[in-house]
Amino acid sequence: MSAELQGLDPGLLLAPFAAGLLVLATHVPLGIEVLRRGIIFIDLAIAQLAGLGAVAASLTDIDELFHGFGPHGLGSQLAAGLAAGVGALVLTWTERRWPDIQEALIGLVFVFAAAAGILLLAHHPHGGEHLRDLLAGQLLWVNWQQLLPAAVLYVGVLALWIGPAQRWPRIGFYLLFAITVTASVQLVGVLLVFTSLIAPAVATRAFGGGKRIAMAYLVGAGAYAGGLGFSLIADLPAGATVVCCLCMAALAGLSFFRPVKGGQVILL
């Protein structure tokens, strides 16, 4: 092993990897449902709205009203959740009114939120950094203190998803989705939220039932581990590296697994 690699501390990756596993815990089942419903870009739209809310809050003193809770204060969390919740309500209404163009409307919501964020930060001295952090996140700098509230929230989301959420009307799914994405954006950024939701679901589309969920968790965890490790060795941005690994995992799953009759899957 070279002297440079010997100087690297793999322990730096434990908290970011745990954050990735937490995000996957909720995004794998939600991603499979999103793929089934054909509303692929809903997470991008909701995540961008949550980010817009957080950006708007960061330009005010709202966190000081709540005495702050670290880099993402309670005020920013509430603003992000409110923006995502409003977006969920709007998309529920549009799906009921114009179901044939729902995906196009989801795209417009995403573009609007992204453009509005650019406008809000146009005259901010660190606007470029804010936008980069919103998209790519700061996965490598996630700490254990940030993970505890996220873990509690995700446990609640999973409990609702496994139980009553399956019987809720459409609005229930959208609001649960908004709550989950709001927390995830604060941890890993918009791009990783999208790929964590879609890539494992795409990679395992040849499977069904519980086997698909298990395989999706393995694919996601492997991509996070590989991406984080490579980013540390190559000194690359962690979030962007993991995104690329998840995308390659999705392509590999599509290429190597093919469903056959009887629910079996063959390796090509």
Image: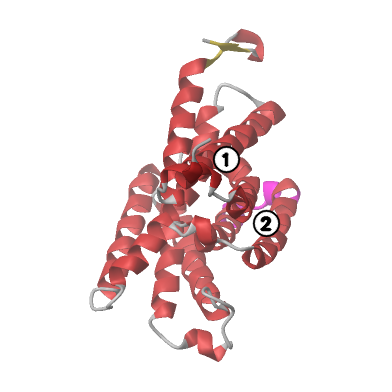
Q: Which residues are magenta?
A: 163-172
The x, y position of residue 266, in whole percent, is 59, 11
Residue found at the very far front of the displayed protein: 3
Q: Secondary structure at mark 1?
A: helix
The residue under label 2 is: 154
Q: Are marks 2 and 1 in contact (CB under 8 Å)?
A: no
Q: Which mark is residue 225?
A: 1
Q: Residue at x 65, y 62 (%)?
A: 147
Magenta-colored segment: predominant secondary structure: helix
Q: Earlier in the sequence, mark 2 or mark 1?
A: 2
Q: Nearer the viewer, residue 241 or 105?
A: 241
Q: How is the image coloured?
A: secondary structure
Q: Is residue 7 above or below residue 156?
A: above
**Residue 95 % position (x, y):** 45, 51
Residue 75 lies within the magenta run: no
What amino acid is labelled 2 in the image?
Tyr
Picture layout, residue 124 above or below residue 225: below
Element class at badge 2: helix
Count of number-bearing discs: 2
Amino acid under disc 1: Ala
| Placement of 111 over or under 58, stated as above or below | above
